Image: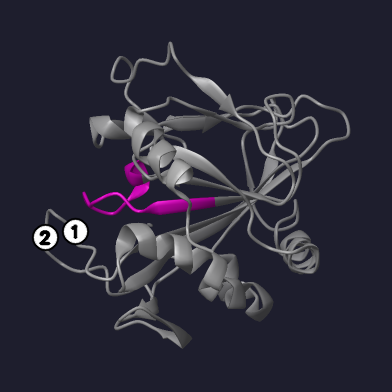
């Protein structure tokens, strides 16, 4: 179902909106089952041992046929089409589980801060697999920050972080979600996730991102043709394809 007028206006004004549940209970259960298999302390972790590590895994759709089928889900692509047009590529996905007691945060950044080369903003869909709030490692955002364009970033360990003084966070607000909600935000929206200081509430999120099919590296002029097509001429493709294979070891988002 396409985005409604109120949600679109909020997205354009603030840089984010809550789309509510886009998947039914059975679909969410299938996603959660595969997610738990792939995103665990046995796979990859972020954070640090002093404050508490948490599981992370990139490109889950490459690792699970069940999850791969969701990147072409009409509920996602109907919304993406509203902003990106009739020709769309899948940009990136990742799973982050702020496990109970993992106090490490992911500091202020824009998703474009991680891109290999400067590029136009893309769309981020943030599926909450658990209720998400500040208490258990939820999101904080700076409303309207997407209007500032790409801010300067630097790396702290593996995280791209907005340079000190480049962002005013005085008006930052929590962006809560209930399990099953899908948050939509611009990749230019400044956001961070705090630590999970609860004893029993995990905070699992699956992040899926889409871009225009002609998305270019503005520094080189090259199209990101290692991202798979998911919609062409307004039609959802039954099988994705890309001109170059994405190197998960060497290609940054």
Return the x and y of residue 175 as percentages of the image width and height. Answer: 58, 31
Asked whether 216 falls inside the magenta stretch, the response is no
Residue at numbered disc 2: 220
Vertical position of residue 229 compared to residue 251: above or below: below
Going by the image, does 170 lie left or right of 115? right
The magenta segment is: 112-125
**Extreme residue in the front direction:** 5
Residue at image position (77%, 65%) is 37
Dot 1 and dot 2 residues touching (CB under 8 Å): yes
Residue 143 in which image quadrant = top left
The quadrant of the picture occupied by the C terminus is bottom left
Vertical position of residue 92 compared to residue 170: above or below: below
Going by the image, does 102 lie left or right of 141? right
Going by the image, does 181 lie left or right of 90? right
Residue 215 in which image quadrant = bottom left
Residue at numbered disc 1: 217
């Amino acid at each position: 179902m396409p985005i409604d007028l109120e949600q679109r206006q909020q997205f354009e004004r603030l840089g984010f909106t809550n789309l509510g549940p886009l998947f039914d209970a059975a679909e969410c259960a299938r996603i959660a089952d595969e997610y738990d298999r792939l995103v665990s302390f046995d796979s990859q972790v972020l954070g640090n041992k002093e404050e508490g590590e948490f599981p992370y895994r990139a490109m889950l759709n490459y690792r699970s046929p069940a999850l791969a089928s969701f990147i072409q889900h009409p509920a996602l692509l109907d919304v993406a089409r509203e902003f990106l047009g009739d020709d769309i590529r899948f940009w990136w996905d990742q799973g982050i589980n702020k496990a109970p007691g993992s106090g490490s945060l992911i500091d202020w950044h824009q998703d474009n801060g991680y891109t290999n080369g400067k590029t136009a903003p893309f769309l981020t869909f943030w599926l909450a697999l658990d209720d998400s709030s500040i208490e258990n490692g939820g999101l904080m955002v700076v409303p309207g920050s997407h209007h500032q364009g790409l801010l300067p970033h630097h790396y702290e360990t593996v995280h791209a972080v907005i340079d000190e003084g480049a962002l005013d966070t005085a008006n930052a607000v929590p962006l809560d979600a209930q399990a099953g909600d899908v948050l939509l935000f611009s990749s230019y929206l400044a956001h961070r996730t705090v630590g999970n200081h609860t004893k029993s509430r995990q905070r699992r999120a699956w992040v899926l991102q889409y871009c225009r099919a002609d998305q270019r590296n503005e520094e080189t002029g090259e199209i990101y043709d290692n991202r798979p097509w998911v919609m062409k001429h307004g039609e959802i493709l039954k099988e994705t394809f890309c001109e170059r294979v994405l190197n998960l070891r060497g290609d940054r988002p």
